[in-house]
Image (cartoon, grey):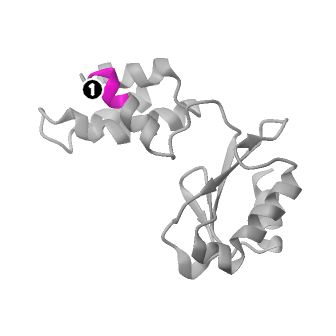
């Protein structure tokens, strides 16, 4: 189900917690699986639960609660635009509209070539750098003017 490298990463996460607290590594294990697979299928979620010796419902609870987890296939590049009030007032709404126009998709949609998925997100804790967007849950993009968006999209092509 997962590569030996991903399983080794999960095993490293497990060492951070007491042996009887494997559930504590659940979020990290799901993140590692999602990085490898691109999204979390029911089979992957259940595999992680069994690997950590947890009931599948515990893994489903976490996977469905946090919006960083994708439960259906998405594009190679997931772009999440912060539309919380500080970002919205600082150009976040305009950045979102620009991206929708540029990519030809709305929030929650994926381009037909499978390259980009556009998501709307809540506060990312970087209000001083507004408007911000997050690339694949890991890379924060700051001061996203139309020019900066064009540059970022060109880098991702």
Task: Count every numbered label the image shows and give the total.
Answer: 1
Residue 50, above or below 153: above
Whether residue 56 is in magenta: the answer is: yes
Q: Position of residue 135 (x, y in %)?
A: 63, 55
Whether residue 115 is visible here, answered yes or no, is yes
Residue nearest the viewer, comparing 145 with 122: 122
**Residue shown at the point (80%, 62%) measured from the top left:** 97
Dominant secondary structure of the magenta stretch?
Answer: helix
Position of 81 relative to 137 (above/below): below
Q: Is residue 141 magenta?
A: no
Residue 78 versus residue 10 in the image, above or below: below
The residue segment tinted magenta is 55-59
**Among the 4 quarters of the image, the one containing residue 100:** bottom right
Q: Residue at x 36, y 41 (%)?
A: 27
* Residue 150 in the image, given as x and y percentages of width and height: 83, 65
Q: Quadrant of residue 15?
A: top left
Residue in the image at 78% along x and 70% along y: 94
Mark 1 Cα-neighbour bin, 10 Å: few <14, some 14–19, many ≥20? many
**What is the x, y in percent for residue 71?**
55, 31
Position of 31 compared to 74: left or right? left
Farthest residue to the front: give it.
85
Is any part of residue 1 visible from this angle? no
Place of residue 59 in the rendered image (x, y in percent of width and height, measured from the top left): 36, 30
* Image point (79%, 58%), residue name: 153
Left or right: 104 with respect to 3?
right
The foreground one among 134 and 67 is 67
Q: For mark 1, what is the residue? A: 52
What SS does tag 1 mark? loop
């Amino acid at each position: 189900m997962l590569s030996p490298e991903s399983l080794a990463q999960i095993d490293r996460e497990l060492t951070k917690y007491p042996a009887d607290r494997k559930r504590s590594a659940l979020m990290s294990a799901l993140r590692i699986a999602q990085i490898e697979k691109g999204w979390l299928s029911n089979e992957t979620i259940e595999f992680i639960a069994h690997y950590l010796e947890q009931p599948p419902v515990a893994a489903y609870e976490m996977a469905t609660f946090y919006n960083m987890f994708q439960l259906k296939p998405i594009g190679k590049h997931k772009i999440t635009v912060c539309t919380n009030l500080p970002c919205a007032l600082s150009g976040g709404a305009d950045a979102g509209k620009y991206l929708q126009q540029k990519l030809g998709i709305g929030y929650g949609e994926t381009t037909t070539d499978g390259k980009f998925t556009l998501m709307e997100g809540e506060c990312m804790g970087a209000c001083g750098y507004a408007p911000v967007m997050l690339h694949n849950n890991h890379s924060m993009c700051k001061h996203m003017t139309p020019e900066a968006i064009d540059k970022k999209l060109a880098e991702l092509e």
